[in-house]
Amino acid sequence: MSILSSFAEALTTGRVEVVDLTAPLSSETPVIQLPPQFAQTARFELEELSRYDDRGPAWYWNNFRTGEHTGTHFDAPNHWVTGQDGEDVASVPPQRLIAPAAVLDFSAQAAEDPDFLLEVEHIQDWEATHGPLPEGGWLLYRTGWDARSTSQQEFVNADDTGPHTPGLSPACARWLAEKSTVIGLGVETVGTDAGAAHSFDPPFPCHAGLMGSGKYGLTQLQNLAQLPPTGALIVAAPLPIVSGSGSPSRVLALVERG
């Protein structure tokens, strides 16, 4: 039996489970909030064109409007000034959209401290137990933040000092961008950077480092709790928007069971 035939059989028998890591996309989907002097992303909107009526008697369809970085989405290198000469989302090689994943679970720490930051030492401790991060794969950073995804207020978690969401320290972001062999970082929060990253040195180190190194981001993931620490295969499918800086994406994990 060929490799693909074996894989298809594993899917139909349930030996390989497909776990959807994508948040539902609607007008209620939380979006990032920037300071008022900056342009803001649009919430997701549907405009009905027809629904089995005189505008189109046999069909239902819509226009939609949204930001590239709304909901579960893919960050391409040109999203950040450090990667402005890098790939747009349509130029990402398709073979890089399917890759293995390491899942690092720090949900307990984030529950105690919403400003929790992942450090290089945390990753090294994980590697001592599970082995090295997958070359050409994803680091998926579980914080339990997807439990907040039905509320804009709880998801952004902002007060007078700004948002409070977990992320990476500047040193960890720099290490992930420059020293690790992964192609990108996936998170459950609204962006790859911590909520307080506007005040870091440098500001927004995940965006600056990853995009500047030609790596990628996946954000607003869900259901990471259903994945093992190693062994999952991630399929990230952004729209190939020419010159786009990112795209809402369907992100799936293939997990071997039994």
Image (cartoon, rainbow, N blue to C red):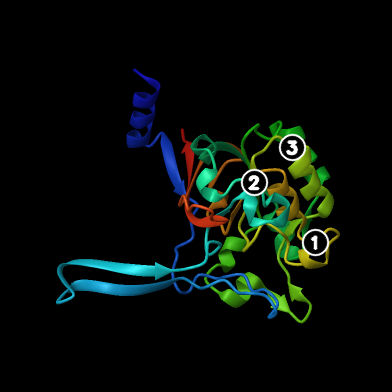
Label 3 secondary element? loop
Per the rendering, the mark at residue 180 is 3
Vertical order, 212 against 247 (above or below): above
Q: Which is more N-terminal, label 1 or label 2?
A: 2
Q: Which residue is mark 1?
A: 203
Q: Which is more N-terminal, label 1 or label 3?
A: 3
Q: Which is more N-terminal, label 2 or label 3?
A: 2
**Residue at 45% from the left image edge and 52% from the top image edge:** 239
**Left or right: residue 152 compared with residue 214:** left
Give how far apart the Cα atoms at labels 3 and 1 are. 21 Å
| Mark in the foreground, 3 or 1 | 1
Q: Amino acid at mark 3?
A: Ser
Label 1 secondary element? loop
Crowding near the residue tagged with mark 2, few <14, some 14–19, many ≥20 C-alpha atoms within 10 Å:
many
Give how far apart the Cα atoms at labels 3 and 2 are. 19 Å
| Mark in the foreground, 2 or 1 | 2
Crowding near the residue tagged with mark 1, few <14, some 14–19, many ≥20 C-alpha atoms within 10 Å:
some
Residue at the far top in the pictured view: 1
Comparing 248 with 223, the one in front is 248
Q: Amino acid at mark 2?
A: Gly
Q: x, y (%) of residue 247?
A: 51, 56
Label 2 secondary element? loop
Per the rendering, the mark at residue 86 is 2
**Left or right: residue 73 compared with residue 114:** left
Q: Amino acid at mark 1?
A: Pro
Q: x, y (%) of residue 71?
A: 52, 63
**Residue at 74% from the left image edge and 54% from the top image edge:** 208
Q: Quadrant of the N terminus?
A: top left
Q: x, y (%) of residue 12?
A: 32, 36
Q: x, y (%) of residue 135?
A: 65, 31
Give how far apart the Cα atoms at labels 2 and 1 are. 20 Å
